[in-house]
């Protein structure tokens, strides 16, 4: 059973930074796309950023210029560096990994809270 284990969430003041990490375990296959979604209270889950196996990236307009996604294919890991955080970035952040042959997987979520 594939597991995506997230870490790095927490409480930070507006303008601060956090780095989220997600490592896929119990798997020998590689993921075509890895990324991060978030869900704020009362809102739908939304894409934050994703990155392909060759390094192509895509970001939500709301985080462009502030967040940077990266991955380590050898470790089956994806990271999200979040700078200049705003209160509206407060949400549960979920790691997502997609394999063309094995389907999609989700992490358990990590809380990010930005205080004003």
Image: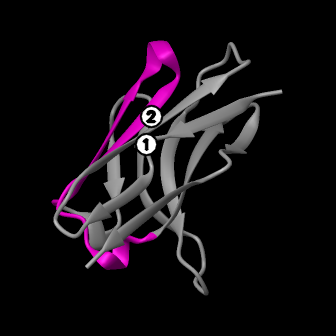
Mark 1 highlights which residue?
Answer: 8
Q: Residue furthest right?
A: 1
Please identify the quadrant where the N terminus is shown. Answer: top right
For the point 31% across and 74% down, the residue is 115
Q: Residues within 10 Å of mark 1 (few under 14, many from 20)?
A: some
Picture layout, residue 26 above or below residue 41: above
Frontmost residue, 59 versus 81: 81
- The x and y percentages for residue 66 are 19, 59
Q: Residues within 10 Å of mark 2 (few under 14, many from 20)?
A: many
Q: Is residue 85 magenta?
A: yes
User: Which of the two discs, 2 and 1, labels the residue nearer the N terminus?
Assistant: 1
- The x and y percentages for residue 76 are 53, 22
Q: Secondary structure at mark 1?
A: loop
Q: Which stretch did the figure color magenta?
A: 65-90
Count of picture labels: 2
Q: Secondary structure at mark 2?
A: strand
Mark 2 highlights which residue?
Answer: 78
Q: Residue furthest bottom?
A: 42
- The x and y percentages for residue 51 are 40, 42
Measured in 3D between alpha carbons, the distance from the residue under mark 2 to the one under mark 1, in whole angstroms, is 12 Å
For the point 68% across and 48% down, the residue is 108
């Amino acid at each position: 059973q594939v597991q995506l284990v997230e870490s790095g969430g927490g409480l930070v003041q507006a303008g601060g930074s956090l780095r989220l990490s997600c490592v896929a375990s119990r798997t020998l296959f590689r993921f075509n796309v890895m990324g991060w979604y978030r869900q704020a209270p009362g809102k739908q889950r939304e894409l934050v950023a994703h990155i392909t196996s060759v390094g192509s990236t895509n970001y939500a307009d709301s985080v462009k210029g502030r967040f940077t996604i990266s991955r380590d294919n050898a470790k089956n890991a994806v990271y999200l560096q979040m700078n200049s955080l705003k209160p509206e970035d407060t949400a549960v952040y979920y790691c997502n990994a997609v394999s063309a042959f094995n389907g999609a997987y989700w992490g358990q979520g990590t809380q990010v809270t930005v205080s004003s």
